[in-house]
Image: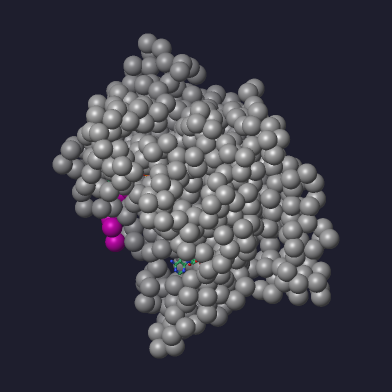
Amino acid sequence: MQTEPFLSVRGLKLYFRTRAGEVQAVDGVDFDLDRNRAVVILGESGCGKTSLAKAILRLLPRNISCYSGSILLKNRDVMTLTEEEFRRSVRWVQMSLVPQAAMNALNPVIRVGEQVAEPAIIHLGASKREAMEMAGNMFQLVGVPIDFLTRYPFELSGGMRQRAAIAMALITSPSLIILDEPTSALDVLTQANIFNVLKRLKKELGLSFILITHDIATSSELADEVAVMYAGQIIETADASAFFTEPLHPYSQKLMASVPRLRQRTELDFIVGRPPSLINPPKGCRFAARCPFRFEKCAEDPPAFRRDGRQVKCWLYA
Amino acid sequence: MSQVGLDHAASIPQQARPILLSVQELQVWFELRRFGFGHAGYVHAVDGVSFDLAEGEAVAIVGESGCGKSSLMKAILGLYKPTSGRILFQGQDIHQFSKERKRWYHSRVGYVQQDPFGALPPFMPVRRILEEPLIISGVKNKNERMERIRKSMEEVKLSPVEDFIEKYPHMLSGGQQQRVVIARAMITEPKLLVADEPVSMLDASVRVEILKLLRALQERHNLSVIYITHDLSTVSYFSERIFVMYAGRLIEKAPVHRLIDHPAHPYTQALLTGTSEPDARNALSYKEVPPGEPPSLVKPPQGCRFHPRCVRMIGGECDVNEPPEFTVADRHTVSCWLYK
Ligand SMILES: Nc1ncnc2c1ncn2[C@@H]1O[C@H](COP(=O)(O)OP(=O)(O)OP(=O)(O)O)[C@@H](O)[C@H]1O
Ligand SMILES: Nc1ncnc2c1ncn2[C@@H]1O[C@H](COP(=O)(O)OP(=O)(O)OP(=O)(O)O)[C@@H](O)[C@H]1O
Ligand code: SF4
Ligand SMILES: [Mg+2]
Ligand SMILES: [Mg+2]
């Protein structure tokens, strides 16, 4: 018997109102995630990755013009919850976020430990003492020395601050963590260190992850599955090993060919042109204008076609 | 499968190409002042760096954040005065130059700075941005300046020129902005181009476009290039030699493929292990990472600066004496006691 996935996102939309028009930042996104698995959302700057994270966690700015779709978390559609219910039983409690540039977003005048402890006080009703003790445990989990609890952010290196940000997301013991570009600003060895931490958390705590990044090479350090985002939509989902060996969508293929590799001496490729505007995006396939395989059909919007358990939003796979 | 770029250049014996730039025992220290205490020591940002760069040669300097890469570059550009040591350009000490000569030097050296988004003045259109270095280097004729602006814009593929020349930086994409920065660096037809993390802020596909552009310019103009990065995976597409920098020093120097296939220094080995390739098997194992973090540059460790993190540290040697440069193969040197 097939059990329901842990998380199932369907037709998720998030549009912003701007003076220039409506920005369709997340435009009908579907994907599933099982318990204790990690999905990587790959895509170029501006394609809507952060907006997708915000839509899932319902962290919305004011200028929303459309927010719809369904988010089944353990079989319950959390989109139907009131804000109060969502805050009480979903955000932080079941899923939390390590925001983009989190390590630079820590409050400079508050001790790191207090900042990490705060969600436990707010969302779990822990006392200050309990919360500080929990923060200490989280520090151990992510490999920050305990005596850093009483330090200020500027006294920590970038890598340590990023670990602290992860500790903060962990303190309410959610089962899903969304990481938005967690290592893009960090050095190679610091990156490798953080990914070691994430792998260990996944193994020891059974967590699920949504990892959002444009860094394809390091994303493979955690990925069980890959979802490629282009101009507000997911254009391919696949098992990580299938994806990294043989991407199917023309955009994914081009993207993979642009990844510099240490030991392979093949010529790098790049994609001519730029992604379309998210205000009035093209009607058909959004990649069509840049696609080397474009044909008449591509003027229509392709559905997601199934192929070997993968999904590709491209007419070539009809 | 086409081989990348510079193998023809790499096959020319080094001696055949004249030395363009020679950095000798360079130190760049910054005085550290603490409120109420006055002098509190020095940041040893660059601490005994030597290398020669041939005409038409491209080298990469690789190292982690804060190891001194930008300080080294700024000294080469004449923006920081060396605490000691010398920088010779075509045999002449750049810090002995007269004002006139300095201006000439600045037109011989192009600079693509670290942060492309902060690099361009927001209130100037592309035309003004490119005209300025020409005015400074003394191109008096307006028509000649316009001619060169158009030519350099076409070289970096900001064409049709009319579409871009009156635009302000905020109207351009990240990749286009970076091409303006490169055009500005190239417009005085320099001999040497210094590119400080030219692509680290850009998306993968744009990154490749810019790297290819830099390589094409390098080949076409027989430019010498110093390419600074913390990302080892891009260097083999661009340079002939790599210098690995750690805590203010160059700890290993080798031709690119030699360094990638036979890294000698334990730190270089760690960097290579730490660099990921897109491969689903990565998720199945942990990466070996040296413990700890790079040392303070105010009081760098005695002996080898990497010794507190090094698994192969030789007690009584590595923690006491600074390792000199040992030669392990042709054009491959390493500062590590394992190679004594
Ligand atoms: N509050 C907002 N109002 C209007 N437009 C917005 C808002 N937030 C984001 N956008 C726009 O939505 C699009 C998607 O932005 P988003 O931040 O989700 O991209 P991203 O994929 O995370 O990019 P990056 O890799 O640069 O972080 C962009 O065009 C952005 O300018
Ligand atoms: N003008 C300055 N005054 C004082 N200290 C400085 C100055 N410039 C740099 N430093 C210090 O010198 C050290 C080396 O800095 P540098 O900018 O050269 O490193 P980097 O290798 O370019 O780092 P990144 O990869 O982050 O750009 C750092 O500790 C930095 O704080
Ligand atoms: S000199 Fe010693 S401490 Fe330094 S890298 Fe070599 S073995 Fe390690
Ligand atoms: Mg983002
Ligand atoms: Mg720098």
Residue for point 65% across, 43% down:
B241
Residue A71 x/y as whole percent: 39, 45
Q: Is residue B174 left or right of residue B326?
A: left
Q: Is residue B211 above or below residue A60?
A: above
Q: Is residue B317 left or right of residue A141?
A: right
- Of residue A309 and residue A148, the one placed in the foreground of this image is A148
Residue that sits furthest to the left in the current view? A19
**Residue at screen point 47% across, 64% down:** B81
Q: Residue at (30%, 24%) from the top-left corner?
A: B160
A80 drawn magenta? yes
- Left or right of A28: which side holds A8? right
Residue B159 falls left or right of residue A239: left
Residue B183 x, y percent position in the rendering? 38, 37
Image quarter of the N terminus of chain A: top right
Whether residue A296 can be seen here: yes
Query: Residue B198, can we see it?
Result: no
Does residue A183 sit above or below A158 in this rendering? above
Magenta-drawn stretch contains B3? no
Q: Residue A28's spot in the image, x, y percent?
A: 35, 35
Residue lying farthest to the top in this orientation = A296
Q: Main secondary structure of the magenta part?
A: helix
**Quadrant of the rendered image containing residue B165:** top left
How many labels, in total? 0
Q: Nearer the viewer, residue A24 or B90?
A: B90
Q: What is the span of residues highlighted in magenta in the rendered image? A: A78-84
User: Along the line of sight, which residue is nearer the eye, A170 or A275?
Assistant: A275
Asked if residue B297 is positioned above or below residue B95 in the image, the reply reads: below
Taking the spot 63% from the left edge, 52% from the top edge, the residue there is B51
Q: Can you name the residue that lies furthest to the bottom here?
A: B36
